C-alpha cells in the first residue's frame, strides 16, 4: 500500500494562514490519527491530501509521486465523511457501487463486491433502502462500505464517528479497530476525540494552531509528551499543571509552589538541574496521585477535596492546592469526605516538567 | 366560525366571478344583454367550439407555444445555473444581471422586441444586413418562433434563479464524495446534481407551464395574434371573442376549457408535492423503526 509524504504543506485562506508547513510521513499499512482541537488544521490537512482543497505551498507525495495538482479521483483514495455524504437518491447498493459503476467495471464483479462489503459491515438486508430510511449507525456503515468497495490503497476518515451517540460511537470504534487490522490499507483518521486517537492509532499526530505538536505511538505521547499542550490534550481526566520553582538544597532538587514542596528523583532531578530557567510547570496525571495519609510531605501533595464525581469503579476528585485546581483519580472504595484535607503521594517516576515560558518538556 | 371571513372573501372574490363565467358559458350572450336576458343554450357553446377550426388552431398554437417555451427555458435556465454555480469574482453581479428581464413589465418587453424585430429598422435585421445575410421576416412567417424567443428571453431567468437556489442547497459533501469516487464534472451533473434538483425542477416547470398557458401581453403587443392565426394563443382568442365578435357565452366556454387545462396542471403539481411529502414521511418512519 502506498506511502504518503507531506512536505512543508502550507494552507492560506486569503491573508490567513491556517497551516504552517506540515511535514509528515505515513508508512505502509499504518493507521495514522491526526488529532487536535477544532481549528487546529487537521481537517484541512486531510482535505488537502484528498484533493478537495488546493495546496498553497509544499507538496504531497503518494508513493514518491507528487499529487497536489491532481484531481481527487487520480489519487487512488477513499474517504469517509463526517456527515456520511451518502447520495440520498440512490439506494444502499447503488451508493456502495457508485465508484465501480463510474469505472465501468463488469456487472458481475460489481455485484460480488457490493455483497462482499455489505456483509463485512452488516448491511446485507438493507441494500434496497435509501439513506433516508436508515439510522445514523447504518448510514455510517454505508459510508464505510462505499469507501471499502473502492479498493483504494489510502483510506481517509474525517471525524466519522462524531455524529453518533456515545454508545454507538464506542461500538463503531471497536469495529473500526477490528477492520483496520484485517484490511491492508494506509489509513489516515482525523478526530478531535483523544480517546478515538489513543485506541485506534498506530501513530498519533497531535496538531494545534496549524503546527504539528508531536507525533509518535499512543504510549509514547502519553508517557513522554513533548510539551504542555500534548500533555494536557491526551489523557482523561487531563493532566494537572502547577506552577513551581526549582530549588537545589545540597545534593537534592526540589520543586516548590503554592501549597507543595516536592523532592525530584532520578531523571527528573537531573533535567531540572541542568535546565537554565528555574521557573517551571509541574505536570502530574490524576492517575499518578495515590491516597496515602502517612506519606512524607516532600513526596506528596496536600489537597482540599471540593467535589467528588462518582463514575463507577473510579471516582474523580476535584481538589484545590494553593489556589490551583487539581483532579485526582481514586478507587471509589476509598472512604473520602468532601471538605477534608488529604495527602496524596506523587508517583516520582511519572512527574512531568515543562518550561513555563516555552511550554516545552524538559 | 373563524373561517367565516375567509369564506366570505372566497365567495365574493372567487366563487361569484367563477360561477358567473360558468353560468354565462351556457348562454348565447351578447354584451348588450344582461345575463338574465341571454338565451340558455346548454352545452352548445362547448360543442361548437370543438368543431370550430379557429379554436382548434388557437389551442394548437397555445400548446406548441407552451411546450417549446417551457422546454427551452428549462434547458437554458438549468444549464446556466449549472454553469454559474461557482464562486468567482463578479459572479453576483452577473447573476443579478441575468434576472433583469424578469423584472420588466410584459408590455415593455413586447414593445422592445417589436422594435428589435422590425423588418427594416429593427436591430436583428440591421445586424443581419451588416454581416451580409438576408433579412428574416421575424413577425411574419416566423411569428410564433419570434414570440417564443421573446418569452424565453423574459422567463429563462425565473428558472435560472430557482435552479441556482436548488443547486446551492445541495449537500456539498455528497458532491465531494462523488469527486473522490471518480465522477467527472459531467458525471456529477448527471448522477448527482440533476437527480437531487429534480423535485424543485418539476415544480418550477409546472409553474412555468401554467404561466405560459395564460400569456397575453407580450403577444398582444408583438403580433396581436397574427399574421392570420399563427400566434393567436387562447388568452388572446378569448379576449377577441368577447370584444370583437361580441360572443360572451363562447368566450366564457373557452375560458373554461383553459381553466380545465390549468386545473389539471395545478392538480398535477399538488399531487407531486403531496407524493413527495408522503414518501418522505414513510422513509422517516422506516428509519425510526430500525433505530
Image (cartoon, rainbow, N blue to C red):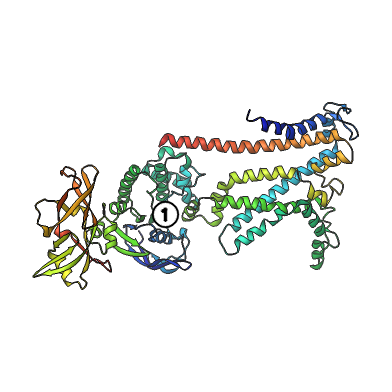
Residue B28 locus on image (x, y percent): 88, 30
Residue B158 to residue B282: above or below: below
Q: Quadrant of residue B116?
A: bottom right
Residue A90 locus on image (x, y percent): 50, 44
Of B17 and A143, the residue lying toward us: B17
Residue A96 to residue B129: above or below: above
For image coordinates 23% across by 49% down, the residue present is A306
Q: On the picture, is A327 further left or further right than A193? A: left
Residue B240 locus on image (x, y percent): 86, 42
Q: Which residue is mark 1?
A: A78
Identify the residue at the far right of this view.
Answer: B32
For image coordinates 88% across by 28% down, the residue present is B38
Quadrant, the C terminus of chain A? bottom left
Callout 1: SS: strand
Q: On the picture, is B247 further left or further right than A134? A: right
Of B235 and B61, the residue lying toward us: B235
Disc 1: host chain: A
For image coordinates 83% across by 36% down, the residue present is B251
Quadrant, the N terminus of chain A? bottom left
Identify the residue at the far bottom of this view.
Answer: A276
Q: How many numbered discs sit on the rendered protein? A: 1
Q: Residues within 10 Å of mark 1 (few under 14, many from 20)?
A: many
Of A40 and B263, the residue lying toward us: A40
Q: Quadrant of residue A60?
A: bottom left
Residue A202 to residue A273: above or below: above
Residue B81 seen in render: yes
Residue A115 seen in render: no
Amino acid at each position: 500500500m502506498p506511502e504518503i509524504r507531506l512536505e512543508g504543506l502550507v494552507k492560506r485562506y486569503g491573508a490567513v494562514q491556517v497551516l504552517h508547513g506540515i511535514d509528515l510521513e505515513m508508512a505502509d499499512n499504518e493507521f495514522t490519527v491526526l488529532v487536535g482541537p477544532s481549528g487546529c488544521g487537521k481537517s484541512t490537512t486531510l482535505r488537502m491530501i484528498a484533493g478537495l482543497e488546493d495546496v498553497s505551498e509544499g507538496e504531497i507525495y503518494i508513493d514518491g509521486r507528487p499529487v497536489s495538482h491532481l484531481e481527487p479521483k487520480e489519487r487512488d483514495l477513499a474517504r469517509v465523511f463526517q456527515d456520511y455524504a451518502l447520495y440520498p437518491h440512490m439506494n444502499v447498493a447503488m451508493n456502495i457501487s457508485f465508484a465501480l459503476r463510474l469505472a465501468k467495471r463488469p456487472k458481475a464483479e460489481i455485484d460480488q463486491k457490493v455483497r462482499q462489503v455489505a456483509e463485512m459491515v452488516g448491511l446485507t438486508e438493507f441494500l434496497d433502502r435509501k439513506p433516508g430510511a436508515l439510522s445514523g449507525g447504518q448510514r455510517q456503515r454505508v459510508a464505510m462500505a462505499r469507501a471499502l468497495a473502492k479498493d483504494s490503497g489510502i483510506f481517509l476518515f474525517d471525524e466519522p464517528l462524531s455524529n453518533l451517540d456515545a454508545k454507538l460511537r464506542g461500538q463503531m470504534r471497536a469495529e473500526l479497530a477490528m477492520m483496520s487490522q484485517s484490511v491492508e490499507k494506509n489509513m489516515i483518521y482525523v478526530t478531535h476525540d483523544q480517546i478515538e486517537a489513543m485506541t485506534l492509532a498506530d501513530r498519533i499526530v497531535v496538531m494545534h494552531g496549524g503546527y504539528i505538536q508531536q507525533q509518535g505511538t499512543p504510549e509514547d505521547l502519553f508517557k513522554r509528551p513533548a510539551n504542555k499542550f500534548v500533555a494536557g490534550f491526551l489523557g482523561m481526566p487531563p493532566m494537572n499543571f502547577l506552577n513551581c520553582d526549582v530549588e537545589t538544597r545540597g545534593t537534592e532538587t526540589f520543586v516548590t509552589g503554592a501549597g507543595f514542596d516536592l523532592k525530584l528523583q532520578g531523571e527528573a532531578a537531573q533535567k531540572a538541574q541542568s535546565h537554565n530557567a528555574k521557573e517551571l510547570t509541574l505536570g502530574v496525571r490524576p492517575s499518578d496521585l495515590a491516597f496515602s495519609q502517612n506519606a512524607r510531605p516532600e513526596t506528596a501533595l496536600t489537597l482540599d477535596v471540593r467535589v467528588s464525581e462518582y463514575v463507577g469503579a473510579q471516582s474523580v476528585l476535584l481538589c484545590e492546592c494553593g489556589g490551583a485546581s487539581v483532579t485526582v483519580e481514586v478507587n471509589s472504595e476509598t472512604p473520602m469526605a468532601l471538605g477534608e484535607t488529604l495527602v496524596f503521594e506523587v508517583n516520582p517516576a511519572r512527574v512531568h516538567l515543562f518550561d513555563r515560558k516555552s511550554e516545552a518538556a524538559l | 366560525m373563524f373561517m367565516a371571513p375567509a369564506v366570505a372573501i372566497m365567495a365574493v372574490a372567487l366563487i361569484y366571478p367563477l360561477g358567473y363565467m360558468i353560468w354565462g358559458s351556457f348562454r348565447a350572450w351578447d354584451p348588450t344583454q344582461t345575463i338574465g336576458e341571454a338565451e340558455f343554450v346548454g352545452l352548445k357553446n362547448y360543442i361548437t367550439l370543438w368543431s370550430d377550426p379557429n379554436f382548434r388552431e388557437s389551442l394548437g398554437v397555445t400548446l406548441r407555444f407552451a411546450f417549446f417555451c417551457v422546454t427551452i427555458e428549462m434547458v437554458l435556465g438549468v444549464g446556466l445555473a449549472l454553469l454559474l454555480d461557482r464562486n468567482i469574482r463578479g459572479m453576483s453581479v452577473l447573476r443579478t444581471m441575468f434576472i433583469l428581464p424578469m423584472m420588466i413589465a410584459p408590455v415593455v418587453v413586447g414593445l422592445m422586441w417589436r422594435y428589435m424585430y422590425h423588418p427594416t429598422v429593427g436591430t436583428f435585421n440591421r445586424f443581419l444586413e451588416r454581416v451580409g445575410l438576408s433579412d428574416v421576416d421575424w413577425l411574419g412567417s416566423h411569428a410564433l418562433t419570434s414570440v417564443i424567443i421573446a418569452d424565453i428571453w423574459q422567463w429563462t431567468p425565473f428558472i435560472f434563479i430557482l435552479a441556482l437556489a436548488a443547486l446551492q442547497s445541495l449537500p456539498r459533501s455528497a458532491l465531494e464524495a462523488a469527486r473522490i469516487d471518480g465522477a467527472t464534472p459531467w458525471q456529477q451533473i448527471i448522477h448527482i446534481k440533476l437527480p437531487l434538483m429534480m423535485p424543485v425542477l418539476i415544480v418550477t416547470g409546472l409553474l412555468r407551464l401554467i404561466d405560459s398557458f395564460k400569456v397575453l401581453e407580450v403577444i398582444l403587443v408583438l403580433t396581436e395574434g397574427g399574421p392570420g392565426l399563427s400566434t393567436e394563443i387562447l388568452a388572446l382568442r378569448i379576449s377577441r371573442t368577447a370584444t370583437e365578435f361580441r360572443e360572451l357565452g363562447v368566450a366564457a366556454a373557452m375560458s373554461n376549457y383553459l381553466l380545465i387545462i390549468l386545473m389539471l396542471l395545478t392538480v398535477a403539481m399538488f399531487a407531486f408535492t403531496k407524493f413527495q411529502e408522503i414518501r418522505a414521511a414513510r422513509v422517516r418512519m422506516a428509519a425510526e423503526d430500525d433505530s
